Amino acid sequence: MGYARYEIWRNGEKIEAGYDVPTTCEQDGCDEKIDRGLAHLCGTTPGGDEHGCGSYYCGHHHYMSGDETVGDLCGPCIATYRRGRADQNA
Ligand SMILES: [Zn+2]
Ligand SMILES: [Zn+2]
């Protein structure tokens, strides 16, 4: 995987993404410097997918789902994901 810089659509807005694009963690109140690479993405698809919102987070605000098809998720998304899994197992 190696896309340093590319453009994506997110919520109707075109943004630059890729590990060569510097940004800060999108968690409110966090100004940790990160990049818009897949390592920081919520979900697995830039722009958002079934489980991820497509925002970018630092390691403190990014949680492992344990499923590589789901990827790592932000707080709200992992909570929704875990709730969905619990419902399935109930
Ligand atoms: Zn998210
Ligand atoms: Zn953060």
Image (cartoon, grey):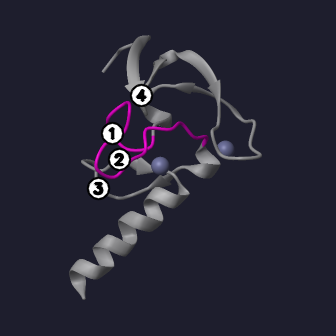
Q: Which residue is drawn at 41% across and 66% down?
A: 80
Front one among 12 and 38: 12
State whether label 2 is within 8 Å of ligand 1.
no
**How far apart are the two marked residues, 4 and 1, measured between alpha carbons?**
19 Å
Say left or right for 72 vs 69. Answer: right
Crowd tier of the residue under label 4, counting other residues whose Cα lies within 10 Å: few below 14, some 14–19, many 20 or above = few
Question: Which label belongs to residue 67?
Answer: 3
Does residue 46 show up magenta in the picture? yes
Q: Earlier in the sequence, mark 4 or mark 3?
A: 4
**Residue highlighted by disc 1:** 44
Q: What element carries label 1?
A: loop
Q: Is residue 6 above or below residue 64?
A: above
Q: Which of marks 1 and 2 is nearer the N terminus?
A: 1
Front one among 49 and 71: 49
Q: Earlier in the sequence, mark 3 or mark 1?
A: 1
Q: Report the span colored magenta.
A: 42-58
Q: Which residue is drawn at 43% across and 33% down?
A: 11
**How far apart are the two marked residues, 3 and 1, measured between alpha carbons?**
11 Å
Q: Which of marks 4 and 1 is nearer the N terminus?
A: 4
Q: Which residue is drawn at 28% across and 81% down?
A: 87
State whether label 4 is within 8 Å of ligand 1.
no
Q: What residue type is labelled 2?
A: Gly
Q: Which amino acid does label 1 sit on?
A: Thr
Q: Position of residue 17 (x, y in %)?
A: 46, 19
**Residue highlighted by disc 4:** 12
Picture quadrant where residue 83 is located: bottom left
Of marks 4 and 1, the one in the foreground: 4
Q: Which amino acid does label 4 sit on?
A: Gly
Question: Which label belongs to residue 71?
Answer: 2
- Whether tag 3 and tag 2 are in contact, CB under 8 A, the answer is yes
Crowd tier of the residue under label 3, counting other residues whose Cα lies within 10 Å: few below 14, some 14–19, many 20 or above = few
